[in-house]
Image: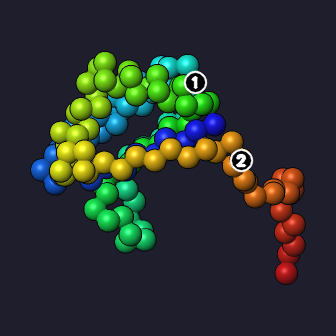
Amino acid sequence: MLRHIVLLQVADHIPADQVDAIIDQLAKTAMSLPGTKAFCGGKKKIGSGLSQGFTHGYNIDFVDEAARDAYLAELDGDRVGSRLSEITVGGLGGILVMNIDISNIQTPDKTPDQKPQLRWV
């Protein structure tokens, strides 16, 4: 499994609905292709203060690199990839992309669901 992570530094003058439309198109493209397992994306949430100017992001889980490559080729076909560089600060300089192998993903152990143990005091 491969996690494709993309962070975007969207320029201040770009309307929010334009950014949302592009992210929606990315989701539609990704989810229409075989080998895509999941997509999520949107505007960053206020939090750590370490976003370094990145305002939006998305990630896609693919079964393998071939599925990711098919997605990237599809982006070139419908021009949504180049539209990303048109809305970011510095064009491609405002986009950070990483691919991480998640075939060894770890999750915390969970205990079986139980009824809450409530008592009158």
What residue sits 85% from the left and 75% below the top?
Answer: 120
Distance (Cα) linking label 1 and label 2: 18 Å
How far across and down, in percent of the image, does residue 57 sit?
A: 38, 48
Q: Which residue is mark 1?
A: 35
Which of the two residues, 74 or 48, is positioned nearer the viewer here? 74
Q: Which residue is mark 2?
A: 104
Which residue is most to the left? 13
Quadrant assignment, res 72:
top left
Quadrant assignment, res 102:
top right
**Compared with residue 38, is residue 53 higher up or lower down, i.e. above or below?**
below
What residue sits 54% from the left and 25% below the top?
Answer: 66
How far across and down, in percent of the image, does residue 58 sit?
A: 42, 44
Q: Mark 1: which secondary structure?
A: loop
**Amino acid type, residue under disc 1 in the picture:** Gly
Which of the two residues, 32 or 69, is positioned nearer the viewer here? 69
**Amino acid type, residue under disc 2 in the picture:** Asn
For the C terminus, the quadrant is bottom right
Q: Is residue 17 visible?
A: no
Q: Is residue 110 visible?
A: yes
Would you say the residues marked 1 and 2 are in contact, meaning their CB atoms lie under 8 Å apart? no
What residue sits 84% from the left and 53% below the top?
Answer: 113
Q: Position of 5 compared to 102: left or right?
A: left
